[in-house]
Image (cartoon, rainbow, N blue to C red):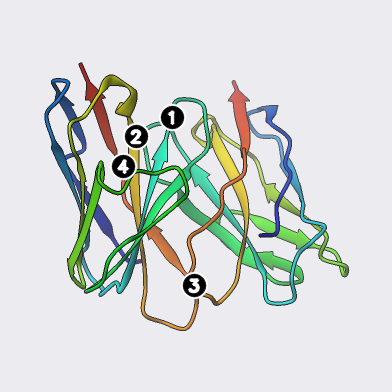
Amino acid sequence: LAKTTQPISMDSYEGQEVNITCSHNNIATNDYITWYQQFPSQGPRFIIQGYKTKVTNEVASLFIPADRKSSTLSLPRVSLSDTAVYYCLLMDTGRRALTFGSGTRLQVQP
Amino acid sequence: GAVVSQHPSWVICKSGTSVKIECRSLDFQATTMFWYRQFPKQSLMLMATSNEGSKATYEQGVEKDKFLINHASLTLSTLTVTSAHPEDSSFYICSAQGQGAWNEQFFGPGTRLTVL
């Protein structure tokens, strides 16, 4: 299975933009890049998904270069409530379980 | 969006007892559900894949006789931890896959199991 690599942790302050980069050098043609957010003692929550270029929704933006070997999740103007673990995963149309890497623990300070 | 529930949200039991955790897809049918386990400060680890009407597929290292999975309907999968021991204390999370072409998965809120 294609693996992803993310920084273990990041710190930020309220109001700043946070960019979390994920490496996936062995991404397959059928893989979509997907990000989940997890708060303590809760199940993961879907944030955003993309295949190439840029995707934006009401929560975040996802930047994917042409070679798709990496991606960057961008959280604009973070708040304290954005403190969580963020997971980058590769998903295809197959009916398989998700493989979670270590995730990035984001700590937002006041 | 689609909602997945789990019951109970937390449970404390004595060593040697069995505990059943339910995972329900509330507004959609799920032919496939997945069970994950998460220890403190760690990532989610897949335990097994639950398919409606057939036997579950367990990941390497997960004892199928200890973690019994039943997927009797398109909206319900259960995980029973038999003869629980303190090392089974963990956060158990299920996810359900929709029936669309896309591999979208919806996660439950998790169940915190503490074995004394």
In the image, what residue type sits under mark 2? Phe
Estimate the x, y position of residue A73 in percent, counting from the top left: 70, 51
* Disc on the earlier residue, 3 or 4: 3
Of circles 1 and 3, the one toward us is 1
Q: Quadrant of the N terminus of chain B?
A: bottom left
Instruction: Check whether the beta carbons of the residues at disc 4 and disc 2 lie within 8 A of each other.
Output: yes
What is the number of the mark on residue B91? 2
In the image, what residue type sits under mark 4? Gly
| Number of numbered callouts drawn | 4
Measuring 72% from the left and 43% from the top, which residue is drawn there? Answer: A20
Same subunit, labels 2 and 1: the answer reads: yes
Estimate the x, y position of residue A68 in percent, counting from the top left: 81, 65
Disc 1 designates what residue? B39
* Disc on the earlier residue, 4 or 1: 1
Q: Is residue B17 above or below residue B71?
A: above
Q: Quadrant of the C terminus of chain B?
A: top left
Instruction: Check whether the beta carbons of the residues at disc 2 and disc 1 lie within 8 A of each other.
Output: yes
- Estimate the spatial distance between the alpha carbons at disc 3 and disc 2, rounded to whole Å: 24 Å
Instruction: Check whether the beta carbons of the residues at disc 1 and disc 3 lie within 8 A of each other.
Output: no
Same subunit, labels 3 and 2: the answer reads: yes
What is the number of the mark on residue B103? 3
Estimate the x, y position of residue A14 in percent, counting from the top left: 62, 29
Disc 2 crowd, CA 10 A, few/some/many (<14, 14-19, 20+):
many
- Estimate the spatial distance between the alpha carbons at disc 3 and disc 4, rounded to whole Å: 21 Å
In the image, what residue type sits under mark 3? Asn
- Estimate the spatial distance between the alpha carbons at disc 4 and disc 1, rounded to whole Å: 12 Å
Label 2 secondary element: strand
Same subunit, labels 3 and 4: the answer reads: yes
Measuring 45% from the left and 52% from the top, which residue is drawn there? Answer: B59
Label 4 secondary element: loop
